[in-house]
Image (cartoon, rainbow, N blue to C red):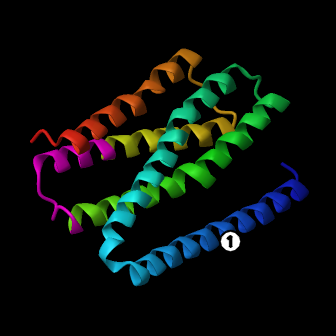
Amino acid sequence: MNGEEKQAGEVAGRRSALRAFIALGVFIAILAAVYLARPNDFLLYIKAFHVIAVISWMAGLLYMPRLFIYHSDAEPGSAQSETFKMMERRLLKIIMNPAMMVTWVLGLYLAWEAYAFRGGWLHAKIALVVLLTMVHVLFSRAVVNFAADGPRKTPRYWRIMNELPTVLMIGIVILVIVKPF
C-alpha cells in the first residue's frame, strides 16, 4: 500500500468512525425519546430493538462465511480478492460489530430488568450467546487474515463454519420461546 492509499484509507476510517459515533448518538437519542414519551412501554421497545439488533447480527454471521467461501477461491491480490476484502471489512465494521454490541447491551439490560438474571433457560441462552460471540471473533480474525493475504482455510471449512451460527441461533430461540427450565 503506497502513501496515498494509506492516507485515503485513514480518511475513510475517520469518516466511518464519525458515522458510527453519530449513529450511536442517534440510537441513544431514540431510546431517550422513547423513555420520555412512553415510559410504560419502554421495556417493550427495548425488546423490539434487541430483536432488530439480533436479526442484523445474525444476517452478518450467516453471510460472512459465504464471502469467505468465495474469497478462498480468489487469487490473492486479484481484483476479485480485493473486492471480497472490502465487502468483508464493511460487513464486519458497519453491520456485525455494531449489531453485536447493541444485542449484548440491550440483552443484558433485559436480563437484568425483566428477569433479574434468574432462570436456567436465561443462563443457558447467555452461554449460547457467548459461543455466538466467539464465532463472531473467529470471523473477525478471518477478515484480518484475508486482508493480509495470509494462509487460507478451504471453502469446505467455511461451509462447515457457516452452520455454527445457525445451530446456535436455533438453540437460543428455543430457549427464549419455550423456557424449558
**Residue extending furthest toward the right:** 4
Magenta-colored stretch includes residue 93: no
Q: Secondary structure at mark 1?
A: helix
Q: Callout 1: few (<14), some (14-19), or many (20+) C-alpha neighbours within 10 Å?
A: few
Residue 12: quarter of image: bottom right
Residue at (51% x, 74% y) in the render: 30
> Measured along the vertical axis of the image, is residue 53 above or below residue 134?
below
Label 1 is placed on what type of residue?
A: Leu
Q: Residue furthest bottom?
A: 36
Residue drawn at 9 percent across, 42 percent down:
181
Relative to 6, does residue 180 appear above or below in the rendering?
above
**Which residue: 50% across, 38% down?**
61
Say which quarter of the image contains residue 78. top right
Q: Residue 83, percent across and down?
A: 78, 36
Asked whether, in this view, residue 19 is left or right of residue 169, the answer is: right
Q: Position of residue 173 (x, y in %)?
A: 30, 39
Which residue has dot 1 on it?
18
Whether residue 80 sits left or right of residue 102 in the image: it is right
Position of 42 relative to 91 (above/below): below
Q: Is residue 179 above or below residue 35?
A: above
Comparing 49 with 154, the one in front is: 49
* 42 on left or right of 127: right
**Which region shows up in magenta?**
113-129
Is residue 123 found inside the magenta-colored segment of the image?
yes
Residue 39 seen in render: yes
Q: Is residue 11 left or right of residue 60?
A: right
Residue 147 x/y as whole percent? 68, 40
Residue 151 in view, yes or no: no
At a point 43% along the width and 49% down the height, the residue shown is 54
Q: Position of residue 82 (x, y in %)?
A: 78, 36
How many numbered marks does the figure carry? 1
Q: Closer to the camera, 67 or 143?
A: 67
